[in-house]
Each structure stands twice: as structure tokens, then as C-alpha cells.
Amino acid sequence: MADHNSPTEHADHDADAYVHGTMTVEEQSATYSLFMNLAKWGSLVIAALLLFLTLWFQPGGSFVAGAIGGGVLAVAGFAFLKSGKNH
């Protein structure tokens, strides 16, 4: 005998009720934009931090050289990413 109260009953009904092309995509578009912005700015922060630490902790390196290198990369990356075409 079939169980009419199965755990997937509501999900099955939602899948049957969905009509292709009726979903609004504003929330999906906002989520995608947020993810892309976090990815590009996060990558810049990681790259600048990595350069800073590499120049600071290399043999014969210094904090000042690391700060200058990381700062230059951060400023150049910021200018490059801000000037990019926004979708």
C-alpha cells in the first residue's frame, strides 16, 4: 500500500506546480552580484596581504618594503577593479 504522507510530498507538489519561466530573477541576480563582488575584492585583499607578508618575511626583507609593496598592489588593484565595466 502506498504511503500518502511521504516525507517528499510537499517537495513533489512544488516540483509539479513550478512553471518554467515564471520565477523572478531579481534575488538570484542580486546574489550573483554579491558573490562576484566578494570574490573580486576578497581576491585583491588576499593578494595584497600575501605580497606584504612575502616581502616582510623573506630573508633580508623588511616591514616597510612589505607595506609599500602591499599598499601599491592594493591601490593599483582598487583602481583597476573600480574602472572595470559594471554589469
Image (tube, rainbow, N blue to C red):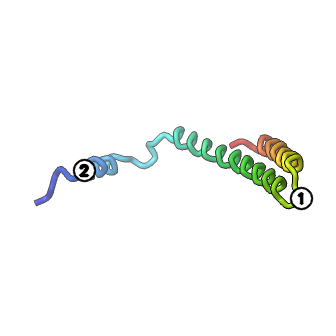
Is 19 left or right of 25, judged from the image as shown? left
Residue 50 falls in which quadrant of the image?
bottom right
Whether residue 76 can be seen here? no
Marks 1 and 2, how far apart at CA: 67 Å
The residue lying at 15 percent from left, 55 percent from top is 3
Residue 83 falls in which quadrant of the image?
top right
The residue lying at 48 percent from left, 40 percent from top is 24
Q: Nearer the viewer, residue 17 or 8?
A: 8
46 up-or-down from 34: above or below: below
Q: Which of marks 1 and 2 is nearer the N terminus?
A: 2
Q: What element carries label 2?
A: helix
Is 23 left or right of 72, judged from the image as shown? left
Residue 60's mark? 1
Spot occupied by residue 86 in the image (x, y as percentages of width and height): 72, 42
Crowding at label 1, few (<14), some or many (≥20) Cα neighbours within 10 Å?
A: few
Task: Name the amino acid type tagged 1.
Answer: Gly
Task: Name the amino acid type tagged 2.
Answer: Glu
Q: Name the residue under label 2.
A: 9
Q: Is mark 1 on a helix, strand or loop?
A: loop
